[in-house]
Image (cartoon, helix red, strand yellow):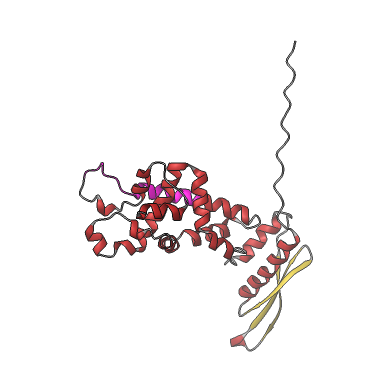
Amino acid sequence: MSDLDALQARIGWTFRDPRWLRLALTHPSLTHGQEESQQHNQRLEFLGDAVLSLILTRELYERFPQVGEGPLTKARAQLVNRRALAEQARRLELGRCLLMSPGEEANGGRQRPSALADAFEALAGAIFMDGGLEPAQRFVLGCFERQWNGFAAIPRQENPKGELQELLQARSAHAPRYVTTGATGPDHDRLFECAVEHEGVELGRGVGKSKKTAESQAARVALERVRAQFPARPPEPPPPASVPAAPNP
């Protein structure tokens, strides 16, 4: 079995047009100084970036229906940063399949993170061009399956207060209110306690070295409570199809 056959077995897709696979694996160094008609994988990388973004964005959107745009954007960035994509390429052993110049190979090009990340994106684009969205989606979600298993929830956000306000104001016109309930310790080492209330009901408490930290901790506690109280709503069924009027005789 050739390296390319083994690669197609690993990715779970046999190319109908093998030229797409070859293009995805062609490093720019191989065509440097040649005619402009000699193509490399950078255009496919551009396409693959959009394919990855679409597929992963949809998956995050469906898996975490109560999470706002900002946290979802950060979660997607964790999945598709250059280091993460290079690791995906290493797992697929893309480096050994890259087509590159002898000079680039001698300089460690097969293991260069940027080249590996580019090749992974280009491969996603090539699968999309060869077979459409469905095989591209199977490939992408299969590659990221281990990450999904570790994403029991979106990692805690840097702005839990904003997240809580967005969640509450989707159901009420009132914003949450933060109250400092206590402070202990000497002036140089104070520990603050804060509570967050909404419509007269306390949702959570937090402590911290500053009021801001205590409020953020209270918001995190409140977020967990609110999400448990208001589970994700199932999507509304589509409206029934209208019955066309009978034609006049």
- Magenta residue span: 35-54
Q: In screen coordinates, is 155 left or right of 205?
A: left
Residue at the image point whose x is 53% and y is 53% from the top: 56
**Residue 207: image location, x then y, percent:** 66, 78
Q: Residue at x 53, y 57 (%)?
A: 73
In magenta segment, residue 225: no
The residue lying toward the viewer, choosing from 248 and 210, is: 248
For residue 37, which quarter of the picture? Answer: top left
Looking at this rendering, what residue extends furthest in the left direction?
33
Residue depicted at 54% across the width and 63% down the height: 146
Residue sitting at x 39%, y 58%: 117
Above or below — where is 190 with respect to 177? below
Relative placement, left or right, of 32 versus 165 is left
Residue 19 higher or lower than 143, as above or below: above
Give the prevailing secondary structure in the magenta stretch. helix
Q: Quadrant of the C terminus?
A: top right
Q: Is residue 32 left or right of residue 115?
A: left
Q: Residue furthest front?
A: 1
Task: Please indicate whether residue 198 sits to the left or right of residue 37 in the image.
Answer: right
The residue positioned farthest toward the bottom in the image shown: 186
The percent coordinates of residue 155 (x first, y second) are 58, 66
Give whichever of 57, 173 is nearer the camera. Answer: 57
The x and y percentages for residue 3 are: 35, 55
